[in-house]
Amino acid sequence: MDQRKKVGNYLLVQKIGQGQFGVVYKGVSIEDQKKVFAIKCILKSKLQKNSMLSKLFQTEMSVMSKLHHPNIMHLFEFMETTNNYYLVIQYCNNGDLENYLKKMGRLSEDEAVYFLMQIMNAFQTLHKNKIMHRDVKLANIFLQDDKIVIGDFGFAKQGVDMTWTKLGTPITMAPELLTSNGSSYTSKADLWSIGVCFYQILFGKTPFEAKNYEELKEKVKTLSGSNLRFPKDVPVSPECRDLLVRLLQYDATSRIEWKEFFNHP
């Protein structure tokens, strides 16, 4: 008798992660156990207690069920039991880029560009559908073999060109959010975050090393754009440097446009 927990047409094989909403399991289809999925289990009680969490959860479901793109996490099925919600999504066998980078240290320029191209492909679709991710970081970029899959759309914003809410992770947060006093910002905030991730992949560290929030704000202001520093021990091409300088522009209006980003050499 198989002791593993059954949910719908799936067996939960093992716990693989803990998210802001609940637990993530590796699961297999009961009919064909070669078909592997990631299954997010969310406690209903957790969402009912917190309207913000509930809203983030609805957003994540909406984005992932709407988009069909090889580089964007897809929601295959949604199930509900008395106590839990279950989201059946892609299983990414190589985990996330943050852990991948911990193992690798940093990546060669060729591999970094190969990953960046896939991030670009995902964002072409997101941009076309007017979806801001708002929390682009290595931990939210997953790897299925060597294919990039952008996930974690809990903070995403749909259908607008501009928004006000301050969300995200400080180390990859665009200056207009980091120093925000409630002013509006556009999807160019995602371009900054992509720039930080690309820098991390190339150099194995963040562009703005800081001990606290205030120091981070100061470094972002003084060491971005043309003042961006590149480690001397890692040679990268002039094209990569140019792209990083243009992505990591303090002033969003000076930052590279999406169309230029997608067509950058």
Image (cartoon, rainbow, N blue to C red):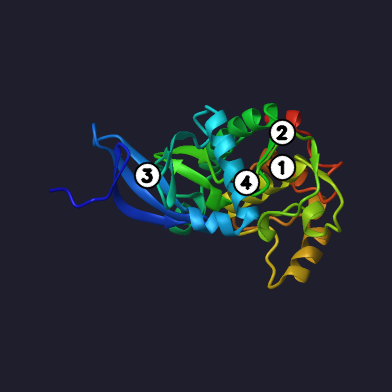
Which tag, 2 or 3, sits closer to the chain's start? 3
Residue, far left:
1
Q: Is residue 5 above or below residue 8?
A: below
The kind of secondary structure element at disc 3 is: loop
Which-is-in-front pick, marks 4 and 3? 3
Q: Residues within 10 Å of mark 2 (few under 14, many from 20)?
A: some
Which tag, 2 or 1, sits closer to the chain's start? 1
The kind of secondary structure element at disc 1 is: helix
Q: Evaluate whether residue 265 shows in this view.
A: no
Which tag, 1 or 3, sits closer to the chain's start? 3
Q: How far across and how far down the image is residue 236, in percent?
A: 62, 46
Residue drawn at x 55%, y 46% is: 152
Label 2–label 1 contact, CB within 8 A: yes
Residue at numbered disc 2: 261
Residue at numbered disc 3: 93
Q: How far across and how far down the image is residue 201, in percent?
A: 56, 50
Label 1–label 3 contact, CB within 8 A: no
Say what amino acid the circle numbered 2 marks.
Phe
Residue, far bottom:
211
Residue at numbered disc 4: 236
Which disc is residue 179 wearing? none
Between 58 and 247, the one nearer to me in the picture:
58
